[in-house]
Structure formats: structure tokens, C-alpha cells
Amino acid sequence: MGESAGEQLTFGSGPKTPGVGSEKTAHTHRVIQWEFRPCGSGFVVPSACAKAGVLAMTTSLAVEWAKYNIRLNAIAPGPFPTEGAWSRLIPSKQFEEHSRNSNPMKRFGRHEELTNLAAFLISDMAQYINGECVVIDGGQWLQGAGEFNDLLMLPDSYWEQLESARGKK
């Protein structure tokens, strides 16, 4: 990959290289969102496997592409309510309350917290951060893996409700 290939990967020019006149430094950033850290969680095997692969790609390419001044970092968000996923993953208000209370901070993430982290990682303030996976989950990962393992507590009627919702796209 030569200088021109590095320029093709650039989303925008970075600061001028000190003492080199008008040359540009390529600063390309990739921020990838994923959950379930490498150990996974019950009931999310396909997703956990794919996301573990994305983490391996992120860390590998962070080393390979660093010489082109391209940084790769990942974000591992905990529960952040969204319309589409939330109704499928949190089958009842009772389970939502249980999930909230299971988090050390006793709340779910706010979307502005996630966007602020992403903005920081692609900013000039984070130029030396490379190959990292930043967890933003209120301490849930530190408390114990398996965000969805509590689904084992659900009665069969809830599983039927989840399955019927899954068929509707």
C-alpha cells in the first residue's frame, strides 16, 4: 500500500506534519459497535461469534495499518434501548426492570453517551488510541458476563411470545 493508497483510505486530512510543509497525514478511523465481549452470552451465539470476529479484525488491522497512520478502535456498548431491538430482547416491563436493576448503575445507557464516546475516538484528542475496545455499559461487564442469561428465568409463554415476534419483520 503506497502513499496514494493511503490517501484513498482517508476520510479527511489530519494536521500538517510538523516541519514538512504542506504534506498531509492520513487519519482514518473505524469505530465498530458490538456487544457480548468475547465470552458471549446465552441466546446470542451467532451474533456473539460474528462480533468476536469483528474484534479480532479490529485488533489485527490496528497493528497492520498503523504504519499508514490508520487507527481502528471498537466500542462495546451494553444495553442502550432502541425501538427495534428492545422489543425483541426485553419481552416485558418486568424483565426490563430486572435488567435495569442488574446493572451496577441501575440504568441503561443514553444514546448521547454512546455518540460522545464515538466522537472522542475519532477526534484529534484520541490520536494515540489504537486497537482498543472501549466498553460502555455502566460496569455490567465487570459485574459478570452473560447479559441475556437471565432469559432462562422466563416461562414458556414468554418464549412463545418472543418466537411469534421473531417471525414478524
Image: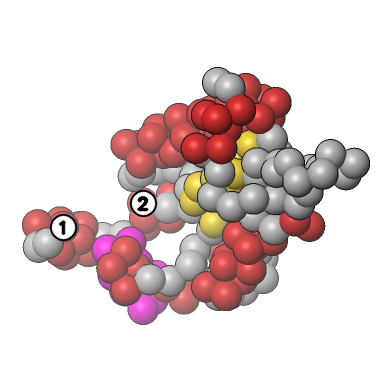
- Residue placed most toward the observer, 26 or 105: 26
In the image, is residue 61 above or below residue 74? above
| Residue pictured at 64% horizontal, 37% vertical | 70
Asked if the magenta segment contains residue 92, the reply would be yes
Q: Residue at 58% across / 22% down in the picture?
A: 2
List the residue tagged with mark 1.
166
Where is residue 63, by image quadrant? top right
Magenta range = 87-95
Q: Residue at x 64, y 55 (%)?
A: 122
Tell me the kind of residue under disc 1: Arg
* Above or below: residue 69 compared with residue 99: above
Q: Residues within 10 Å of mark 2 (few under 14, many from 20)?
A: few
Figure check: 49 above or below 37: above
Residue at x 63%, y 63% (from the top left corner): 119
State the image coordinates of residue 72 (x, y, percent, origin top left): 61, 39
Residue under label 2: 152
